[in-house]
Image (cartoon, helix red, strand yellow):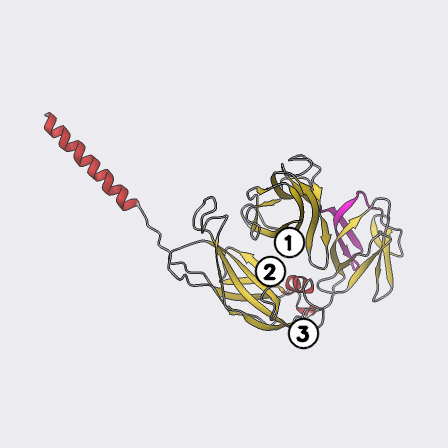
Amino acid sequence: MNRKSILYLILFGLTGLFAACEKDEVKVVMLDNPVAPTLVTVPDLILKRADGNKTLEFTGTAVDPGFQASANYFLEGSRAGTNFANPFTIYSGIQGLTMKITVSDLNTILLRNLDADVTSSVDLRLRAVLVVDAGTGAPGTSASPFEYTSAVKTVQVSPYGLPRLDLIGSGIDQKIESALGDGKYFGYVKLDKAKPFTLRNPDTNTTYGVSGGALAVNGAAIVPADNGWHKLTVDTQALTYKIEAYMIGLVGSATPNGWDSPDQKMDYDAKTGTWRITINLVNGDIKFRLNDGWAWNLGGPLDALTVGGANIPLTAGNYTIVLTITNPNSTDGQVGGRCTITKN
């Protein structure tokens, strides 16, 4: 093969390579006016305790930016006419076509924001948060995502009040509630080893304690095994109870203990369903995690915190941080909550 033939072959090969690269390139073009999601149907929201296990379904349409895109969707409500000054999240996830929630779970959310057994006017909207590129602050990146919101639907909503058990002797005013009114109670409570407590049903004037490790009417006071926040589950029919540590804390280079435990523990606000802390921080990063461990932790964008998400950078100062856990059962990569971080 002569030199001229070799040159022809090289030229042919390069031409083919460039052509292949040009074919492989896919251009993404966003519409000048992307189509916002829509909230299409809303179920009856006059809730009844007897329907607590039933599943309600909201339907919507996806955001259309002009190309196939992934987005996080948030079904949000607020008192009518407030322009979503204090919104609450009913659903969050990676699709907004069919959004399902049980009556009891929705009732719990509503009771944090509305009065029990009262019909209120509520505005609903479906919001899509769209990230089109991983970057460092440019429009459409994770630091500055695009947002598109549906038209508002105003509906009538009535949550039902819950049967409760009051903790007597725990040192603070707190209770656990029965979402279905079936004798099964649950709540987050702050316990002190030095303050044994009993449980009182104010409707029947019945007091529960323990006897031989089981729940018992007029039993001995329950002695907590440890201090701090716990999940307390009680079944007054089966006469059982369970106490599990549930402490949400801040960890990271911006916190007093850095990335080491113990974390900076947050306090739970039962009325709003949020975890709060006011704390002095230094320049660095934070994340949220459960029980000083990494099995479940939250990071990433503040309005769409994901399990295992990125560290949250902060500058030095005194902050009030409020965390809402929207999905305590979320797994890696799934949206599990949102937070507000206010510098005081």
Taking depth in this image into account, of 152 and 19 the one nearest to the observer is 152
Residue type indicated by callout 2: Thr
Is 4 situated left or right of 188 in this image? left
Which residue is under mark 2? 89
Q: Name the residue located 77 percent from the left edge and 45 percent from the top edge.
A: 228
Q: CA distance from mark 2 to mark 3?
A: 19 Å
Above or below — where is 75 with respect to 16? below
Contact, CB < 8 Å: mark 2 with mark 3?
no
Q: Residues within 10 Å of mark 1 (few under 14, many from 20)?
A: many
User: Callout 3: helix, strand or loop?
Assistant: loop
Q: CA distance from mark 2 to mark 1?
A: 9 Å
On the image, the x and y values in percent for residue 183 come to 76, 62
**Of marks 2 and 1, which one's residue comes earlier in the chain?**
2
Which residue is under mark 1? 324
Residue type indicated by callout 1: Thr
Q: Name the residue located 17 percent from the left edge and 36 percent from the top edge.
A: 12
Taking depth in this image into account, of 293 and 203 the one nearest to the observer is 293
Give the residue furthest to the top: 2
Q: Name the residue located 67 percent from the left edge and 74 percent from the top edge.
A: 119
Above or below — where is 148 with respect to 19? below
Q: Which residues are magenta?
A: 224-247
User: Picture quarter containing residue 79?
Assistant: bottom right
